[in-house]
Amino acid sequence: MRVVRPEFRPAPGLDTDAMASRQRDIAAVADFADDHGLTPERIGLDEPPGVQAALGGATTSGEAAPVVVGVDQAFRDDEVSVSAAVAIRDGAVIERAAGNAPLDVPYVPGLLAFREGSAVIDALSSLSVEPDLLVVDGSGRIHYRQAGLATHVGVLFDVPAVGVAKSLLCGTPAAALADPLPAGTRVAIEADDSMDAPDGAVVGYALQSRQYPTPETRHINPLYVSPGHRVSAGTAADLVEATCTQYKLPAPTRLADQYAADLT
């Protein structure tokens, strides 16, 4: 993969105001509408991906099967950020790539792209395949300045991207999330006054990808799915749900999480 917007690379030495300003610039060029040609049917998984010995794969119609790349991060000795990228095509893992970078930016909510982004760029730049979709462990448009890690990375490479977060950074759910939700439920996340997005705009969804049979005694929390770049909010939820198989997490980021753990 090749970075096409190098001006948005995480630069060392920026203060928090400069980083926030850079994120607003990224959000200004991000596209939160569909521009990809993907459907849930084309990338959907019926079971966890296996490993394919060589690159290839096509749909039954003869079209080239889309490549979906999961991205997740880990840390080594609190000094190095490690990123893992796992490419899936036609139900099989076809490539894995790793990246790392010094962990020289402190943790600040909303600024994770500057802490972890260099390692992500390193990993994605090592891939020999071109992704049709990035599924990133982190936020996309559900972000104070509409530029979470998935947006930042999607714009950098100009690739369709979605963010999948385990907690809600900002925004207001359109319905209460206090009680366990049945599997398949979606609740819109609307922009509020903590965000740059227009008040009330749907910036993503709480997606209940899986639930236990008796949630009143043991339950699974929803995922928070949002568009990163060149994907709409509704389609982002559709695509993520299609790749979850029998697990809570979508297969691309679940496998990337496992690979990141192996790297550390």
Image (tube, grey):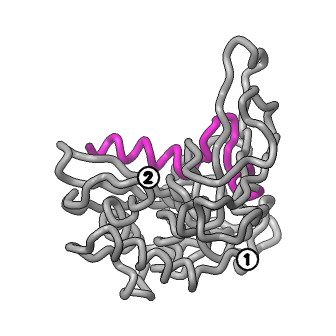
Q: Judge whether 45 appears above or below 88 on screen.
A: above
Residue drawn 52% across and 50% down?
253
Range drawn in magenta: 238-264
Q: Judge whether 215 appears above or below 54 on screen.
A: above
Question: Which quarter of the figure is the C terminus placed in?
Answer: top left
Q: Position of residue 94 (x, y in %)?
A: 50, 60
**For the residues carrying marks 1 and 2, which lies nearer the camera in this image?**
1
Q: Main secondary structure of the magenta part?
A: helix
Residue drawn 33% across and 47% down?
74
Horizontal arrangement in the rendering, residue 255 relative to residue 178 (left or right)? left
| Type of amino acid under label 2 | Asp
Q: Splitting the image into 4 quarters, where does residue 17 fall?
A: bottom left
Residue 68 visible (yes or no):
no
Which of the two residues, 218 or 144, is positioned nearer the viewer here? 144
Residue drawn 35% across and 78% down?
9
Residue drawn 57% across and 85% down?
29
Horizontal arrangement in the rendering, residue 250 relative to residue 173 (left or right)? left
Q: Name the residue beneath numbered marker 1.
A: 33
Q: Position of residue 198 (x, y in %)?
A: 70, 71
Query: Which sits earlier in the primary sequence, circle 1 or circle 2?
Result: 1
Which of the two residues, 98 or 157, is positioned nearer the viewer here? 157
Horizontal arrangement in the rendering, residue 16 relative to residue 171 (left or right)? left
Residue 204 visible (yes or no):
yes
Numbered label attached to residue 238: none
Q: From mark 1 to mark 2, how far is it between C-alphas?
A: 24 Å
Q: Name the residue beneath numbered marker 2.
A: 72
